[in-house]
Amino acid sequence: MSVASATTATRSLPLTLFAVAATVEIVAVAADATALQWIAKPLLGPLLLWHLLRRARPDLVAVALAFATAGDVALLVPGDVAFLAGMGFFLGTQICLLIAFVRRSRPRPLPPAAGAVVWVAVNAVLANRLGALAVPVLVYSLALIAMAAAAAGVGRRVGAGGALFAISDLLIGLDAAGVTLPAHGVLVMATYAAALALITTGWAQRRHQP
């Protein structure tokens, strides 16, 4: 193996390990293997953080990945208290991403307008079903939709990641409201893992551009 090939392989190692961890996590969700989820899921954020820090200095997206890791661990614990804790950590994720994206985003009026419509519609439909979770979900979903709208102005890859993040969390919200789709857990994890990967790799790429 040449030096160039070895260097390329080393640079891609975090993403390769992330793909393995994400695959294991999705399989574990499908098989309801809780112990395996505890091994794989907490690795997702750190592996992407490793990739990001190899390409750029620490920034708010790096902090967002740290918050996401804490949220992943919290959501592995059953119960409403853990769910609210996880939502709090992911609120930190969305706020960090939103601030980072707004700083580098090109104004696009359509994504914020479309996001506002989706936010109002979803919360109006789910409010009665969510009970005590209605207000926390209202606040979190506002930050989530704002992040996704700002992501659309950063670039296609980051924008796709922001949209998938919103879809993944919408699926979680539906489940909290008692609406569960077939293969629900697999859909949540697949969209979430793809969202994190697209946001991180897209952001790392943009950081090298003026």
Image: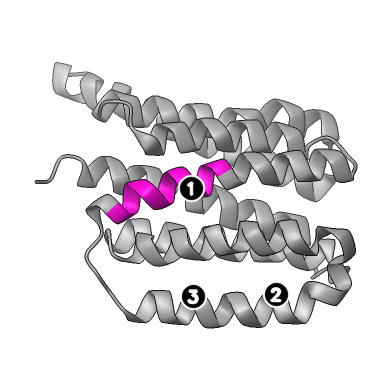
Q: Which residue is mark 3?
A: 115
The answer to whether residue 45 is above or below residue 32 is above
Name which residue type carries label 2: Asn
Residue 94 lies in the magenta stretch: yes
Q: Closest to the observer: 65 or 140?
A: 140
| Residue at 86 percent of width and 76 percent of height | 128
Specify whether 10 is left or right of 164: left
Give the secondary structure at mark 2. Answer: helix
Residue 19: percent from left, percent from top: 51, 39
| Residue at 59 percent of width and 74 percent of height | 119
Q: Main secondary structure of the magenta part?
A: helix
- Highlighted range, magenta: 92-102
Quadrant (top left, top right, bottom left, bottom right) of the N terminus: top left
Specify whether 16 is left or right of 152: right
Q: Count all numbered tags in the image, as a single digit.
A: 3
Give the secondary structure at mark 3. Answer: helix
Q: Which residue is mark 1?
A: 95
Residue 185, quarter of the rendered image: bottom right
Name which residue type carries label 1: Ile
| Residue at 66 percent of width and 37 percent of height | 71
| Residue at 31 percent of width and 55 percent of height | 102
Residue 96, quarter of the rendered image: top left
Q: CA distance from mark 2 to mark 1?
A: 19 Å
Q: CA distance from mark 3 to mark 2?
A: 12 Å
The answer to which of marks 2 and 1 sits earlier in the sequence is: 1
Specify whether 78 is left or right of 163: right
Mark yes or no: residue 183 visible.
no
Q: Which residue is mark 2?
A: 123
